[in-house]
Image (cartoon, rainbow, N blue to C red):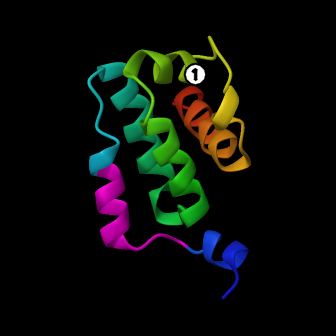
Amino acid sequence: MTESMSENNLIDERALSKLRWRCRRGLLENDLFIERFFDKHAAALTEKQAQGLRELMDLSDNDLLDLLLRRKEPEGELVRADVIEVLALLRTTATAV
């Protein structure tokens, strides 16, 4: 199986559960964005999107919130298709509620 094909595979339930746990944050505002994201997109989350979300979770709470609220845009190593795709989904989910 090629790398691009595996990136488009849906993540399994165990990986999804681990990712949800990894996404727990210290700021309620971030948790609200993330919970809405999972409510809407968990069933269709791909390996590629999960990796982008993991990268965003490596940020501090304040830096993540700045991205979610569009106060900042991704820079440096975060300027990748998977990160930008997930960030767009997180932002859209928040405005759709």
- Examine the image and state in which quarter residue 3 appears: bottom right
Q: Which residue is mark 1?
A: 67
Looking at the rendered structure, the number of numbered marks drawn on it comes to 1
Q: Residue at x 28, y 38 (%)?
A: 24
Q: Residue at x 57, y 48 (%)?
A: 52
**Magenta region:** 10-20
Residue 25 x, y percent position in the rendering: 30, 31
Q: Residue furthest front?
A: 76
Q: Residue at x 68, y 25 (%)?
A: 75
Crowd rating for badge 1 (residues with CA inside 10 Å; few <14, some 14–19, many 20+): some
Magenta highlight: main SS: helix
Q: Secondary structure at mark 1?
A: helix
- Nearer to the camera, 80 or 46: 80
Residue 72 x, y percent position in the rendering: 64, 15
Q: Residue furthest top?
A: 71
Q: Residue furthest bottom?
A: 1
- Examine the image and state in which quarter residue 76 appears: top right
Q: Amino acid at mark 1?
A: Leu
Residue 85 x, y percent position in the rendering: 68, 45
In the image, 74: left or right of 16?
A: right
Q: Measured along the vertical axis of the image, is residue 11 above or below residue 93?
A: below
Q: Measured along the vertical axis of the image, is residue 35 above or below residue 61?
A: below
Q: Is residue 46 visible?
A: no
Q: Residue at x 41, y 49 (%)?
A: 39
Q: Is residue 81 magenta?
A: no
Residue 41 x, y percent position in the rendering: 51, 54
